Structures are given as C-alpha cells and as structure tokens.
Image (tube, grey):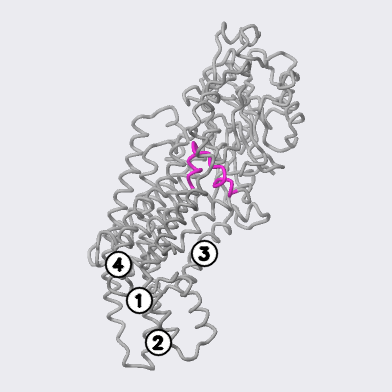
Amino acid sequence: MVHGEVWTIKEFFVYPNEYIYWSIQIVMYPFMTGLVAGAFVLSSLYHVFGVKQLKEIARFSLVFSLALLPVAMMPLLLHLQQPFRGINVLMTPHFTSAIAAFGIVFTTYGMIVASEIWFVYRRFIVESILALRGKPEKSAVDSLRLAIYTVLAMGAMDLSAEALHKDERAVGRLAAIGIPVACFLHGYAGFIFGSVKANALWMTPLMPVIFICSAVVSGIALCMITYIVTMEIRKLLLTWKRKDNPWLPATDDLKSAEVQVVTMTAKYLVMFLFLAITLELLDLIFRGYTAVRSWDILRSVIYEKDFTKIFILQYGLGNLVPFILFLTPRLTVRRAALGSLLVLLGVFMMRWNVVIGGQAFSASFAGFMEYRLPVWPDSLETFKEGLFGALTVIVTPFVLFFLVTRVLPVFGVKDSH
Amino acid sequence: MMNRREFCKKAMIVVGGIALPLTALEVFNPTRLQAEKEGTGKVRWAFLVDTQKCVGCGFCVKACKIENEIPYDANVTRTWVERYVVTRDGTTHIDSPKGARDGFTTAKIDQNSDGMLEVPPADIEKAFFVPKLCNQCDNPPCVQVCPVGATYQTADGVVLVDRSWCIGCGYCIMGCPYSVRFFHPVYHVAEKCNFCYHRISQGMKTACVDACPFGARRIGNLRNPDDPVTKVIMTERVNVLKEEYGTKPQVFYLGLSKEVK
C-alpha cells in the first residue's frame, strides 16, 4: 500500500499521486508548538511586564513549557518516512526551506527556556543542597536528590543579595528575549504552511500571525486547565490532611488565590482569542471577496464538506461558547475550566481544518479527498499516524511535567525572582 | 589561571565556531550560485507533448513503471494520462484510472468513491487525452522547500532526488502544484519523474518517448537550436501547465485546451 492510501478517500478527479500525506501528526505539530509558545508567553507576562497577579501561574507555565518542548519535536519524528535521518536537517540545512530553520530556532528557544528556569530556580536549588547536606542521615532518595541538585547548581552557590538580584535581572532579560523567539518558533510553523504556493487554502501571509495568536490562546488555556486541576488536587490533599491535623490552614486561602489567578489569566485569554478570530475571519472574508480561481473549490470545502468542523466545532464550540463563558460576569473556576477546554478544542480544530482541510481538495480543483483517521493500529504506519500516535503525543508532556516537578516543584517555592 | 567567566566566554566562542555549519558558508559563494541559476551548459532538457496525437493507450505509463521500478500495482506513478470529456452543458469530466496504466478500457468515467459515471455519447461535445509528467521546472518549488537539500536541480535542468538523504517529510510533495511527487512504496522517500535521467544522459530517449506509438511525447535539448523539439517550441503555439505559480515549467504542450487542470 502506498503511504497515505489507507486513510484517503478520493472523490471525483484527483491526480493519481495525490493522497493526504500530511496527517494527524502534522495537526499535532503546530498544536503542540503552539502550546509551548503560549505557555512561555504567559509566564513572560509576569517576568517581563510585571503582571503581579500572574506570579503563581508564571512559574507553573514556565516549567510546563519546558515539559512541552521535547513534545513539539515528537510529532515530526513520528511523521517522517525516514525518522532516523531527521538529524540531516541539522547536518545539511537547506536554508531556502522553511523547515531547515527548525533545528536552529528550536534549540535557541530550548536554551532560553532552560536557562530562564535555571535562574528562577537557582535559589531553590542551592537551598535544597544546603538542607540536604545538613541532614545527618541521608536516605537513598536524598542522596540522589543531592546529586541531581549539585549537578544542576553548576557550582554557582552564591546566595548573597547581590547574586540573587543578578538572577532576577537575568530572568527578566531571558523572558524578554524569549517572547520574540517563542513567537518566531510558532510563527515560523505558520510560515511553513503559509508559504506553500501550491496549496490554495494555506497560501496567505496572515498564516504566521494567525498561528501565533491561536498559539498564545491555546497555551494560556492549557496552563489554566492544568493549574486548576493541580490546585483542586492540592485542595483535596489539604482537606484530607486537615482531618488529622486540624491546625493546618483552611482551603479558603488556596481557593481565593485560585479564583484571582484564573480571572486574571482569562482576561488575557479572551484578548488573544479575539485577535485570533478577527484575523481568521478577515482571511475568510478576503478569500470570498476576491474569489480567485481556487475559491470555487475552497467554498465547497469550507461551506459544505467541512462545515461542521469549521463552523460548529471550531468557531461555534471552540470560540463563541468560550467567549460567552468568559465574558459573562462573575467568572467561576469551573466555568473557566470548561471555557479553557473548549478553547483547546477550538484551536485543535483550527489546526485540523488548516492541515487536513488544506488537503481536502485536489490540486486539480476537480475533486476532493476525505481523511479517515486510523483508530486501531494494524501496522506501524497506522499507529504512528493514527489515533494512538496522537494520544502518545498528548500524554507525553504531562508525564514529563510530573517528572520535572519531582525535581523542580512549582508550588510553595521561594525563587530568586 | 583562567577564571570561570573567561572559561565560559572562550568555550562559547569555540563551540560557536565548531557549530557554524559549513553549508552556511557555501550559501554565500556567488559564482556557484550564478552557475546553478543561469546554467551555462550545453544542455537544457525539455519535453514536448502533442495532445492531438495522444490516444490514451497508456503504453507510456506501463513502460515508465517497468523502467523506473515503481511497483506495478501501487497506485502511484511517475507519469500518467488524463482523459477529459466535455459535455454539451459545459461540464468537464476527468479521470485517470490507475494513471491510465492499462489505457482507458471503458467509456465510463471513473469518479473514485462516487463510482463510474456513464456519459451518453450524444452529450459529448469534445473529448481528449493529456499525458502528464514532471515539468522539470526552471524555478522548482520542490527544490526550494526541501529542508535537507536531498532534491536538487542538475545543470541540464532535471530535478533529481537523492534517495540516501531524503528524510521523507513530504514538504516537496506538498509544494508541487502538479502533484507529480509521491512516496516510493519500497524506498519510503520522495519519488518523481526525472526524464529517465539514466537514459537521456547516455544518449537514449526516455522510456515513455520510446513506448509512445504515435509520437505524442518527445524530448529535446532547448540549448540546441537545430533540435526538432526546440524548433517546435520556438516556432509553434505551445503552452505550459499552471503558469500562474511562477514555476517556469519545461514541459510544453501542443493543443492544450482550457479545461486542462
């Protein structure tokens, strides 16, 4: 079987070699990089612009963005026909290709995130080392933690006020450089699509900007959900502990802090969501108005074939409903969680409608291709580019986040900043 | 004794120096760029298709598949033939069952998942066949988008794929407006028509040209003014496919109709 034949259904005239070559993993790729970029931008709102209310979620989203980072690469490797040659992109980058810059942009961004986290956590790392060293009897876990922290500290043990101040300045600077780089990382994913002149749906200079806006939206939404979930777990744990130790603080403090953070974050989410929708609608209106040769086939894809996916799932459930949820007065945590989930669905559907929708019609403009997502894997190909491959990509950041927070906890830490 | 700050600085310079890819230096070599772009060689391969002569027998497709070892039953092909049937009400029906490997054995139009469409002969205003193959563009979008440089243009204008270096990302497949590219079912890398480069560089014709019983397909050298193909391209009314993409295709068509996509 030819690659792509399993999940492509052709209708009317489609060129013999045309299949849906870019499938679910290429939907996952911009979705995941979007989350990375969005999470980073959210953390920078505090570090650069000093939005104090976001302090709690800022560290959280910074660590989450680190956990998401390796996952942005995963879908690409799962998609490649020759995954072991993926390194060729770094070895012989062909700079006229938008993809060639991936290695450079990605590593630059990775280094910025990693070093920013290092500066944020340096005080915590050093304090942990001192505390662990002071322990008279160390368990195996303690020794392991001491070893990890000692390596992470890289010999910088100075905790003087001056040194901490330097850390703080470094965080601010890195976050400031990080914003354009994060936007570039994602805008460039948009450029990969927007510059394909052979594809009538993709080719628009608005693509990178649309991608950045929806990236920030999705990143904020994911951080909010993960934040809410972890806060709920913490509250549960606290109530559970209070049964035996009634002197512990009540959960009310946590609750009010949570509501405040969520309300503030929601404001930024709505702002970016508004921007994203405006640009998307502008693109759609412009296409309809100018009605160039490709419009006939695009219209039948947008308004007929993909109507449910675009107007019901993406714009309706994914954009309009969250708007109402967030803008109705007296925002509750539960409503914010639901709104964020729907926003994530909306952004995912936007990626789907761009990637799969862009291949829903033949380059001959005389036929259509329908994508059937492989569910049960019966070969490596249907696993990699099927439901389970996509689920693997979705689950990985949460596993990584769990592992990273074993070493660098995100709550209740005094940082250098 | 070096302090830590200095050590870090020096280390950065050394790492940076080592990491600087040699390919980046190559980009700035103007003479080579000039040579690649202008191509001052003696050969520029071009193809001429006379649609008036094509009867849709599919011998070219069959010959190509065998010559270039594209699995015979795989639903991909380096070259194919399209059938156009235009009815009285102005509707155009197009099909190319299995790339017309076995020719067109029925009058019914293959609509893929929509089944076979029977067009009453009385309704047909005009019908014709159009062979398709790689246009070996002068400004090839597939070469531009390849992230590793595995696909490249030779000095004589043919675009080739390096099977040992292609990572299989599919960007070139997406970038080709003519959809001539696909993944090779055996090698799992990008695959396309290369004008039978192994044959033309040895003085032979392409497999499809040799297989065509009606002379609908011809290959020639644009830099040779006495080449019969060049003469036709220079003096007769030829057309190319999808000029609007700015790819400067080098497969020229005689008798191309406006319905052709």
Q: Within 10 angstroms of label 3, few (less than 14), some, or many (20 or more) residues?
A: few
Residue on which disc 3 sits: A395
**Going from the N terminus, do you reach mark 1 or mark 4 first?**
4
From the viewer's perspective, tell me whether residue A319 is left or right of residue B98: left
Q: Secondary structure at mark 4?
A: helix
Residue on which disc 1 sits: A413
Q: Within 10 angstroms of label 1, few (less than 14), some, or many (20 or more) residues?
A: few
Q: Position of residue A144 (x, y in %)?
A: 52, 79
Q: Within 10 angstroms of label 2, few (less than 14), some, or many (20 or more) residues?
A: few
Quadrant for the C terminus of chain B, please. Answer: top right
- Camera-side residue of B175 and B85: B175
Q: Are marks 4 and 2 in contact (CB under 8 Å)?
A: no
**Farthest residue in the left direction?**
A329
Q: Position of residue A127 (x, y in %)?
A: 38, 79
Q: Determine which of the numbered discs, if any, sits on residue A262 in the image.
A: 4
Residue on which disc 2 sits: A240
Q: Determine which of the numbered discs, if any, sits on residue A394 in the image.
A: none
How many marks the image carries: the answer is 4
Give the residue type at disc 4.
Answer: Val
Give the residue type at disc 1.
Answer: Val
Q: Chain of mark 1?
A: A
Q: Secondary structure at mark 1?
A: loop
Rounded to the nearest whole Å, what is the CA distance between mark 4 and mark 2? 24 Å
From the viewer's perspective, tell me whether residue B169 is left or right of residue A120: right
**Going from the N terminus, do you reach mark 4 or mark 3 first?**
4
Q: Secondary structure at mark 2?
A: helix
Q: Chain of mark 3?
A: A
In the image, the segment drawn in magenta is A86-102
Disc nearest the viewer among 3 and 1: 1
Q: Residue at x 39, y 76 (%)?
A: A126
Rounded to the nearest whole Å, what is the CA distance between mark 1 and mark 4? 20 Å
Rounded to the nearest whole Å, what is the CA distance between mark 2 and mark 3? 28 Å
